Amino acid sequence: MQRAGFRQITLALMILLTLFIFALIFEIISHTDTVSLITNIVSPEIQFAIRLSLMTSLISTMMCIIVAVPVSYALARYDFHGKALITTILDLPMALPPIVAGLGLLLVFGTTAIGHYLTDLGLKFVFTPLGIVMAQFTVNISLMLRIMRSTFEGINPRYEHVAQTLGCTPFQAFIKTTLPLSKNGMLAGSVITWSRAMGEFGAVLMLAGATRMKTETLPIALYLNMSSGELDLAIASATILIGISAVTLYLFERKGGIAKLH
Amino acid sequence: MNMIKISHISKRLGDFTLKDIDLSINEGEYFCILGPTGSGKTILLETIAGIYKPDSGSIMVNQDDMTFRPPRDRNIIMVYQDFVLFPNMDVRKNIEFGLHYNGPGSGREQMSEKVKDTAEMLGIGHLLNRHPSTLSGGEKQRTAIARAIITEPKMLLLDEPLSALDTGTKGRLMQELLRIHRLKRTTTVHVTHSFEEAFTLADRIAIMHEGRIHQTGTPDEVFRKPNSRFVADFVGVENLFHGRSVIRDDISEIEVNGSIMFSSTLRSGDVSVSIRPEDILVTKEHIESSARNSFSGVVTDVTRMRSTVKLVIDAGIPFRVELTTRAFDKMKLNTGMKVYLTFKASATHLI
């Protein structure tokens, strides 16, 4: 009798939680009718936000891949002094609140000699779309590193050993064996990185600011329009973000990528 | 004219160490490194291949210092126990892999001709379009060997190449390795923990234990004159006899001291016969069985070990056998008692 009660309580809680999450999503999507939702999605402001979000997130995801592949390879394959410390530091952006990472970025690019030097070269990060890319990259690189590292660790280093004895340079051996074998991990990592970049708010707000029609990504559009009482426009960008999350979750589950995070 | 001379190689890698390894391997030789699992044999091969750099010592090939040369410039190819076929390529692409990086680029047509010849030599010509994951263990290892020998390496390193295979496949592939070696005369270093492989294949063997080479010589030398306690314990409990063998009806008949033994290793002329003590069945009554070898003799010596008992039984030839203490006690054996010995032709190895 008691055991049956326990079972029912856990199941009831599970159903309540599911309903709660469903209600959140449902409330957003059903708040406006379809016609006005579509009207708002095709409005110039939301169209701008979609384009800017897509562009910046695709570029920052590419940057994550380009940087994460060699760095996580080094972490997966080589042993060196201070490896534990370096790993912890590299993991930090993932644990840090994005808004704190954004503050750090603002200080580095806005106040240091390096920042001024880059600005002189034409690489201006503060309050620009370039800053959006940099903010997304910084917040997401840790996760990409983790996924790629566990992917590389799961690939037998002997593939490269054999390829090297057969005449490859270390780089050729990597390109011919480990890299193609890491395809699934890289795909899963890219999808989740991209989706998080699309939704990144805190770090972007700090470094790139929230300027309408200039650094207005989808989450920034949501924030700006909520502040100015334009609920329908806010809901339009929220709906798009929900759609992206749903697609990402589906792709990621299908590739079995969640397991790779642990 | 030593082909490869390894002098004083030491290497630490995780839990494994190589300690002051000295080896000379001759051109065209089939050399086996025999030792229990975990004795550092794989790391030794990987160091010879150049995958790891030794902490000290040198590796010379034909008077040419190879110690710090990258693997690709050595022309020494490694075949692993777990095959390590590239899963992102089919059998054909696996076999031809080395051709893309070795010597003057040969044309498409020459290349595919060479792949076909090598695959056929190993009996896998019909598998070229298959994916490695669809192959049996034996087929995988044949593919790995084809991938290695197609580049005509100076030296072939085989790391426990037969350990992951079932008994039947193992025997067939062993004969194949022998045949290919006779055909190509590629200097081969084969690492194993199996006496049978070492005996069947090796011109010379080295006994390795805990990162050290304990003894080097022909299999017969090492077995008859172990130079240390470890080697003696590792190989010395064997029954080793000398005799003359003739092949009759697909089985070897060996005359040893006037008695006849049968072996499924086909070899004729003067041979050494080895039988592992645990392969000999001891009974108090004569039994009928499919095993070809049957002797009767008298127990002349009993040595109690921790969990086993070693017996010497004089059957015209002195056989050493090993029983568990429990079996020994149950049979109530003692010196002077008459017993029967039975063992299979397949447990009788010829060197």
Image (spheres, coloured by chain):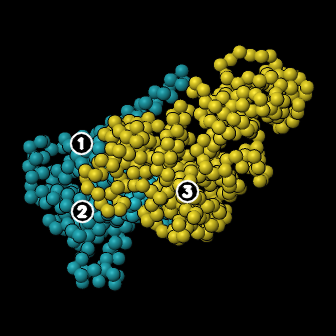
Chain colours: A cyan, B yellow
Across and down, in percent, residue B118 comes to 38, 45
Query: Quadrant of the image for the C terminus of chain B?
Result: top right
Q: Are marks 2 and 3 on the same chain?
A: no
Q: Residue at x 67, y 22 (%)?
A: B291
Q: CA distance from mark 2 to mark 3?
A: 45 Å
Q: Is residue A106 left or right of residue B234?
A: left
Across and down, in percent, residue B271 comes to 68, 39
Q: Amino acid at mark 2?
A: Ile
Q: Nearer the viewer, mark 2 or mark 3?
A: 3
Question: Can residue A36 be seen by looking at this rendering?
Answer: yes
Please say if A106 is above or below B191.
below
Q: CA distance from mark 1 to mark 2?
A: 32 Å
Across and down, in percent, residue A241 comes to 23, 50
Q: Is residue A230 left or right of residue B7?
A: left
Please say if A12 is above or below B55.
above
Circle on res. A59:
2
Residue nearest the observer in this picture, A103 or B185: B185
Q: Amino acid at mark 3?
A: Leu
Circle on res. A27:
1
